[in-house]
Each structure stands twice: as C-alpha cells, then as structure tokens.
Image (tube, helix red, strand yellow):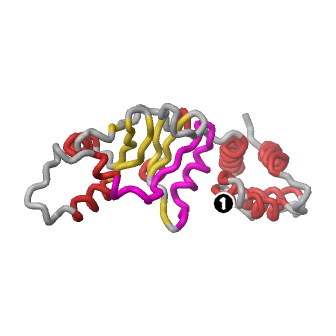
C-alpha cells in the first residue's frame, strides 16, 4: 500500500469533523477552547495544531510536505492515525487498570499492613469497616502517626489498628472514586492537577464511581508516569 497525502487528509478530516464546533471559526480556536473540558484534546493539543499546519500547507498553500515537516508522509500518516484513534475512542480505565485491589479492615493491625508494604511495594490501601469504605491509609499517614507517638517507649505494631492510623488521615483528600468508563487521559489529569491545594494520590475505580460498589481497580500517580 502506497501512502499519499490523500490518506493524511482523510485522517485530518475525521479529526476535524469530530471536534468541530460552530461557536469557533477556526480549527485552532476550537482546540484551545475544547482543551479546557476535554483531557484528550488537551493532551494532544500540540499534535493537533501541528496536523492543522501540515494540512493547510498541503491543501491551501500547495507547499511540498518536506518544507513543513521532518516526518515522511508515511510517518505522518501513522502519527495522525494513532492520534485520531485515541481522540475519538480513548482507552477506558477499565480494563486498562483492572486488577485485584489489596484492601484492609479497620481492625487489621498496622503490622499486617507494614508486612504487605514490604512484600508488595505498594504504599497506599483502601480501608473498610466490613463493607463500608472508611478511607485510605498511606505510608505518609503511617509516618505522621509514628511521629505523633514517638514519645511512647514501646509502640506495638500488632496492637495498633488501622482505625488509629485513619485518624491522622482524616481531612486529607488524597483519593477520588471514578467510574469504569472514564478515559485514561481524564484520569491522568485528575492525578496531576491540584484539588483544593492538594494532589490526589489514588483513583479508586468502581462501576459508577460509588464507594459502596465493588472495587474494580486502582490508579496511582506512579501508574500514570509508567504509562
């Protein structure tokens, strides 16, 4: 198959048709406006403006593609095709981040959680009182609790419960529940944007984003960086 500028144009027209808005006269203005409410457009803003420049150069300026892009037409085509696919059908958090989530009960001991941290390397866990979600216990919360009890001669990790640790975690908005149909770009933005001067450490995924529902997966900041 020989790839030509026509193939690039078809992909661009698909993108243009998807994001067009009669309230904005130009493609660039549409992008800059919609990135405020669409995390995928925001993520690919520079790519989309770049594609617009290439499209206009080819079709309006009648300029050879080599004069406006270091990419070959083949590379440009696969580049724009990938972006078009992500833009129109962005991957959802489920199934991408669907895996068993390690949870604890409020009456579990701190020793049990510390052992789990040692074995898994995970540092934040949802804590329940039977089926009711009570909060997240994190390594920073454990450190704060330890600092507050450093005056004690003996601290028993096996007698300390996660209910005790949750006391110092209260008031910290370090997690959000999200629904399984959220796209990964919106989820990533939640983890990299301040909320009331704080960053979210974890996104807990359920079917409809309701804490009473079964946990389907969890996303942390490290997951965003790795992906």
Q: Secondary structure at mark 1?
A: loop
Q: Position of residue 151 (x, y in %)?
A: 14, 66
Left or right of 126, for residue 161: left
In magenta segment, residue 172: yes
Q: Which residues are magenta?
A: 167-196
Residue 210: x %, y % from top left = 56, 39
Which residue lies at the image location 28% right of the left edge and 62% below the top edge?
144
- The residue beneath circle 1 is 70
Question: Toward the viewer: 146 or 118?
Answer: 146
Residue at 17 percent of width and 44 percent of height: 159
Out of 72 and 45, give the one closest to the viewer. 45
Which image quadrant is residue 131 in? Answer: top left
Pick the quarter of the image with the N terminus: top right
* Horizontal side, residue 27 vs residue 94: left or right: right
| Towards the viewer: 83 or 19 | 19
Residue 165 painted magenta: no
């Amino acid at each position: 198959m020989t790839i030509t500028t026509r193939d690039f144009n078809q992909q661009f027209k698909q993108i243009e048709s998807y994001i067009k808005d009669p309230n904005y006269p130009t493609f660039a203005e549409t992008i800059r406006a919609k990135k405020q409410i669409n995390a995928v457009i925001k993520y690919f803003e520079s790519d989309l403006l770049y594609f617009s420049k290439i499209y206009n150069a080819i079709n309006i300026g009648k300029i050879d593609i080599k004069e406006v892009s270091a990419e070959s037409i083949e590379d440009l085509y696969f580049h724009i095709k990938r972006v078009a696919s992500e833009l129109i059908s962005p991957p959802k958090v489920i199934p991408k981040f669907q895996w068993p989530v390690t949870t604890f009960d409020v009456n579990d001991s701190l020793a049990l959680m510390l052992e789990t941290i040692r074995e898994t390397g995970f540092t934040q866990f949802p804590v329940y009182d039977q089926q009711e979600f009570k909060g997240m216990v994190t390594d920073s919360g454990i450190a704060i609790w330890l600092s507050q009890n450093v005056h004690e001669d003996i601290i028993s990790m096996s007698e300390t419960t996660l209910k005790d640790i949750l006391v110092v975690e209260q008031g910290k908005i370090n997690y959000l529940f999200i629904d399984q149909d959220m796209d990964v770009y919106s989820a990533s933005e939640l983890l990299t944007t301040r909320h009331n001067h704080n960053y979210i450490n974890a996104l807990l995924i359920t079917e409809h984003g309701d804490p009473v529902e079964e946990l389907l997966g969890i996303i942390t900041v490290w997951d965003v960086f790795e992906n």
